[in-house]
Amino acid sequence: MHRDAVVIGGSAGSHKPPARILASLPADLPATVPACPVGHSYSPQSLLAIRSDDAEEATCTAVSAVQEKSMIVEELMTRSRTAGDRAAAGAYAAKATRADHAAAVLQEHITRSATAPARR
């Protein structure tokens, strides 16, 4: 009996490189067994779950960063208004609006991803 296998190795905690390699392999490859030398093995489903968690965490971090940017820009807008610099205040107001919109779009993506049915 002949079996083809692909074994992907890495150190403990190196799930990202095997996930990238696995994603680049043909879908009809007869056998794929990604594993690291410390004995962990990953199915395509478990790698998908890991990558999904990574993507969700990155998106949440992006939302936080954009929200923080909006707060900083709003503070600069308030200071500019107080100083009587209407032009700067207007520019900061526009930046705050864009940052708020970006945060809302990212938040909507998170919400949709969490409730979307699995696609095939």
Image (tube, rainbow, N blue to C red):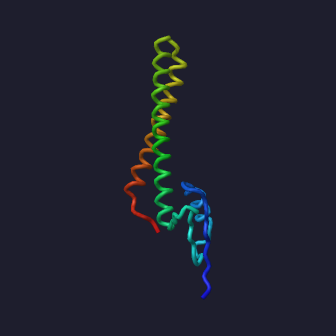
Give the image location of residue 34, x and y in percent. Answer: 57, 67
Residue found at the very far front of the displayed protein: 38
Identify the residue shown where x is 52% and y is 66%.
41
Residue found at the very far bottom of the displayed protein: 1
Give the image location of residue 16, x and y in percent. Answer: 57, 56
Q: Quadrant of residue 113?
A: bottom left
| Number of dots carrying numbers | 0
Q: 15 or 110, which is in the foreground?
A: 15
Which of the image's four quarters has the N terminus?
bottom right
Q: Is residue 107 above or below residue 93?
A: below
Identify the residue shown where x is 37% and y is 56%.
115
Identify the residue shown where x is 58% and y is 78%.
30
Give the image location of residue 17, x and y in percent. Answer: 60, 57
Identify the residue shown where x is 53% and y is 64%.
39
Q: 71 or 99, which is in the foreground?
A: 71
Give the image location of residue 51, x and y in percent. Answer: 51, 56
Q: Is residue 43 above or below residue 61?
A: below
Q: Is residue 91 above or below residue 114?
A: above
Residue found at the very far top of the displayed protein: 83
